[in-house]
Amino acid sequence: MADSLGQEGADERLPASPDSRAHAAAETATRVRRLVAAAALLVSGVFVVAAWDLDVGTSARPGPGLMPRLAAAGLALSAVLALLERVKPSAEVEDAPDSSGARRQLVVVGTLTAYVVALPFLGFLLASAVALSICSWIIAGSHRVGRAVVIGGVIALAVDASFRVLLDVGLPSGLWDIRTF
Amino acid sequence: MSNPWEGLLFGLQVAITPENLLAALVGALVGTLLGILPGIGPVAGAAIVLPLTFTMEPTAALIVIGAIYYGVAYGGSTTAILLNIPGEASSVVTAIDGHKMTSQGRAGPALGITAIASFVAAMGSVLLVAVASPFFAGIGLRFGPAEFFSVTFGGLIILAVAFNGATLASGLLPLFAGLGLGTIGTEGVTGSQRFTFGSLALSEGVSIVSLGIGVFAVTELVFLIGSTTIFSRPSVQPLRFRQCIPSSTDLKRSVLPVSRGGLIGFAFGLMPGPSQAMSTFFSYRLEQSVGRHRHELGTGAVEGVAAPEAANNAAATSSIVPVLALGLPFSATLAFMLTALQVQGVTPGPLLITQHPEIFWGVIASMIVGNVVLVFLNLNLISVWVRLLRVPYDVLIPSIFGLCIAGAFGARYIPADVFWIIPLAVLGYLFRRSAFGVVPLLLGLILGPLVEKHLREGLFLSAGDWTYLFASSGITVTVWLVVLAALLLPRLTVLLGRRHSATAPPAQSD
């Protein structure tokens, strides 16, 4: 008994083997895959409904409604297939981040979302300076706000100037026409 | 211009004009940079560069994107050798012996051999492409809507099924999602609005630049942000050009591996699939079987760097031919080359060689120029590339985000193109977390309109006879047989393997 208890204790302290990690990753990937497949099935249904008014035409003269229906059918079939399949442990799957990594990801994606929404109103220079400063601060993982502000500002200036002057590509200047040149 | 040597000379005349020389230089530098930097690979880089090519001549536009494509191979090898972090899948094998050489204090010769092997193999591949081009021109005369449909749609299925995921659905679901995304917007033939819901923004459709940036750049960076590696930067020893000159022994030992690798790479580049990565594995395996110093492979043998690098770059060169000659890109980066051609009003395909020889031969010959630029610049700029590897992530990642947003807007000056980046990045993230391929998504979006065009043309020509699209000629039958084989063979192999292990006699115990 003592030996088995000792043995169990020893097993708990041992790190997970690569095989068991691969299996766990495959199980997680399968769960996410089923969610994605279910969403794809729903989207294919929405596609068919939205394409209802589009003319399918005839076999000899196919209309604009044919391709969306074919794509939706293919999506639905492959979604059903995905629901039935399991991801093998040997498959290449991205690892899930730890909780702090997931938090960083969510904050950065939220910042980028606000960035693209604000772009037409604030203009590229101002929106980039703010958003990229926030991203820099999150990635640095430190409290050096001043450094992040300088980095975001310099990048915004450099990209705005490069695109406008060197590449002759106009970027949004926003409601107050803020830009480098 | 049926004589390939005439074509190549003509192409060189086109390639050495100031605009095209500059395009090759810029593409080569950008490509190397993309190969070295994490989080932004050739697809995202081509997506950002693509809108900037709209104002260029078609030849210059293709030269830039082509140079990015094979320039990335050089950059990816640099990080593989110095840091054991392959910049691209095609550099994974190089890291095996390349990083061992770095540990032995021979990083310089490893990088030098990489540059020389890549250059020599790419040059050989260009010459082979020139010789093979009349064959493609001949095939072109036999292509009609059914053949185009078979090659485009059949090729897409092969790519999705054979090379993009752990299971059948791993490639097919993203492919059909991409085809579906490609139907959003104004339909080309009748001008019908599809899935626009009265929105002007949606009537412009989903930009491939947005998809390339969202799925390939932003997604990659989000994964990087979630990992713990962003809090550290690798330490890299400074290197100078003189240290990168390989010894005469290294050069002598590399001759046969480069020759073998180059031929393997050329062949792989003409086939669908991740040709660069596959060619490196195959050439390394061959060296392990027949190489004179095969027993040293894995311990820092120069052959372990020379062979896969030769294969890699030869494949990058020859894989441009299916894009130009068949209009079928076998990789996401080359799909942007196709788009660049379409935007310029040039139809890629078998007739490109005869209808636009300046484009076909100009691009082929520019690979000579581009590789010359790469071999000299990369070695001379090695200290710059090494310094770039030390840039902290809190500077690098926001810089790339800024470039992505500017690049996405600059494609069509439509705010919606920037908005699309976020949902597409989320889609890319979910796909990669659940073993779905992302390349079929991009290829579906880019080639979907072409597939639809050929489908409708074929049905119109055949008065509604669907068999015309599948069995009207030897080419269509061959393509669909290959598709069936790609769909069924892997499954049959697994089934047969299970039956064999079930019926095998049990092992004898002592």
Image (tube, coloured by chain):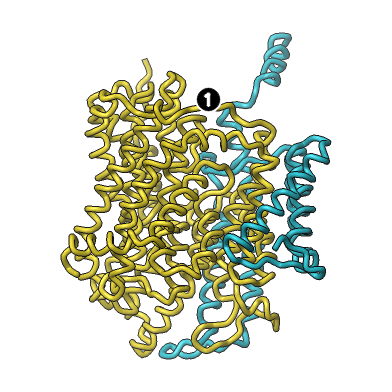
- x and y percentages locating residue A101 in the rendered image: 73, 40
- x and y percentages locating residue A134 in the rendered image: 79, 48
Rendered hue of chain B is yellow
- Direction left: furthest residue: B3
Identified at 24% across, 47% down, the residue is: B124
- Direction top: furthest residue: A2
The cyan-tinted chain is: A
Is residue A49 something that shows in the picture?
Answer: no
B305 in relation to A58, above or below = above
Q: Nearer the viewer, residue B476 or B329?
A: B329
Query: Residue type at mark 1?
Result: Gln
Within-10-Å neighbours for mark 1: few <14, some 14–19, many 20+: few
- x and y percentages locating residue B227 in the rendered image: 67, 38
Q: Quadrant of residue B173?
A: bottom right
How many numbered circles does the render carry?
Answer: 1
- x and y percentages locating residue B405 in the rendered image: 66, 59
